[in-house]
Image (cartoon, grey):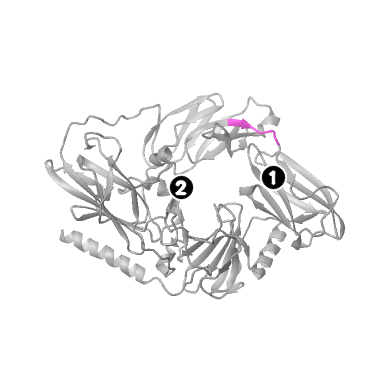
Amino acid sequence: MKKLLITLFTSCTLLVNGQSDIPKKDFIPPLRITTVLAGSFGELRSNHFHSGLDIKTQQRTGLDVVASASGFVSRIKISHYGYGKALYIDHPNGYTTVYGHLDKFSPDLEAYVKAKQYEAESYEIELFPAPNELAVTQGQLVAYSGNTGGSGGPHVHFEIRDKNERPMNAQLFGIEVADHRAPIINDLLVYTLSDSSAVNQSQARQKLTITKQPDGTYLSENLTAYGAIGFAVGTVDMQDAANNNNGIYKIETSLNGEILLNLEMDKFSFAETRYINRMIDYSYFEEKRDRVQKLFIERNNPLSIFKYEKNKGVLQLNQDGTSGIYTIKVSDIKGNETVVVVPITIAKEPILSPTVKKVTPYFVQADANQNFKVGDWDLFIPEGSFYDDYYLDVSANTDALHLDQDLIPVQKYIKLSYNVSAFQPGDRERLYIGRVNYRGLLRYEGATLEGDHISASVNALGDFKLGLDTKPPKIEAIDLTDGKWISDYKTLNFKITDEDTGIKSYRATINGNFILLEYEYKKNLLTYNFDDGISVSGENQLQLIVTDNVGNSTTFKTTFFRK
């Protein structure tokens, strides 16, 4: 016990000292409105933890985005997906702030970026200005809020990163968000973690009934358990000014007052973020669309958010005839807490519902590279693709491959290859490998042609099939007809779609000169701004070429006139 107390004291001291080093007055919010969150740091997302604060912009775009602290622009990245238009500012104290999903940059920065885009003849671009080439001061306008990239609605994604490029919780730096609401507990699950363990005479995963008490504490139903067991909790938090669900900051578990696990959403590295699929119950999410996070650390889980653990958070219940109280304390960053209490009777009872283990010819080891041949399909599964060893249910039916179900998380990409020697050479270039979605439709995954094989890399299990795409993309001019006078137009807009494999590239010219088109994939929209000054007075010839992921292309040509 003395050793445990020393360990806990040391851990807590390190946490306090680490947080005391964080500058709490150096940064200001990036928007000139009250900070209301659409998403919090560390929130559980698909295949990743959320790396910043999603700040609401009152359902509008075009709000002023200001530098959170003085420094210089160190990186500018524009992409169709992800953060969309993003700005990175380095600061003298060693931190970097990131501003994502922007609509456009401040006038000086916008002119700088556009000149680089025209030089590269590409909308997507990544720039690394020299130190102090683009200096900014705290509170200076640097951009306007938007909805670009993978954004699901107007907001600003804001991050603070340390010198090692690890995102940190910006609220630790004094970015204030009003919050007097305690976290909410939605789900509580229990698991048996050894062949001899049981809960209520069963070895199956069980969802427990919890009841909220008058004091705000949640009380679980009584359990009878024996052996190694673990729990998972589904929990969310809300702030004062919004009713959307956000992530939590801290969870601490204990058995009879002795701490088993402490996790804290203070920072993480991008290299570890996909391990979220190891921490959550992945199969439960795929089945129920509800995320619960395990309160025990399994093999191949290197997440740094675990600040303390005893026995990996696992309960070892081996004293037959005794009882215990398991406690889960969930906290937000403002210190609001919610507690779950689980009464446990420790008793070794007959197991009426044992675990049934699946055995197939396809045994995958987590720590080995493996190759399998299934019909005309070849599978390469790299070491570390899975967190555990599994028997996979794999079968092939001509050009269709069943690769188990998307209930087992995949950490690394698996390579699928199909022998296409039976196809004519001209058709091979239009073949692709797709995933069959829940509607039975084929979604493009990849199309790398290597000799007689076409391949794709996938990072989830499921059903796959060979597809043939001979249909070119479609181009629709929204506000332009051939020969039209458009002197008063500020923009031109085109809708581009591709039915099978999706858009890979596009390129447009006016009178043979490259023009910059912004692509909003969520609306299938290409936009050209006449401020670029490419068109001339009188007749102009416009050409737009759009290509899909297997090389089919469509060319659109038109003539317009301007004064």
Q: Secondary structure at mark 2?
A: loop
Quadrant location of the N terminus in the rendered image: bottom left
Query: Among all residues in the image, which is located at the extreme front?
Result: 214
| In the rendered image, the vertical position of residue 61 relative to residue 374, given as above or below | below
- Tell me which segment is drawn in magenta: 466-471
Residue drawn at (25%, 52%) of the image: 213
Q: Quadrant of residue 143?
A: bottom right
| Amino acid at pointer 1 | Ile
Horizontal relation, residue 252 to residue 474: left or right: left
Residue tagged 1: 496
233 or 316: nearer the eye?
233
The answer to whether residue 468 is magenta is yes
How crowded pointer 1 is (Cα within 10 Å; few <14, some 14-19, many 20+) is rated as: many
| In the rendered image, the vertical position of residue 107 relative to residue 394, given as above or below | below
**Residue 47 has which mark?**
2
Verify CB contact (< 8 Å) between mark 2 and mark 1.
Answer: no
Horizontal relation, residue 313 to residue 390: left or right: left
Alpha-carbon span between mark 2 and mark 1: 29 Å
Residue 460 in sight from this viewpoint: yes
Where is residue 77? Give x, y as percent: 59, 59
Q: Quadrant of residue 286?
A: top left
**Residue 476 has which mark?**
none
Q: Secondary structure at mark 1?
A: strand
The answer to whether residue 218 is magenta is no
Mark before the other along the chain sequence, 2 or 1: 2
Residue drawn at (68%, 30%) of the image: 427
Horizontal relation, residue 149 to residue 223: left or right: right
Where is residue 328? Give x, y as percent: 27, 52
494 or 76: nearer the eye?
494
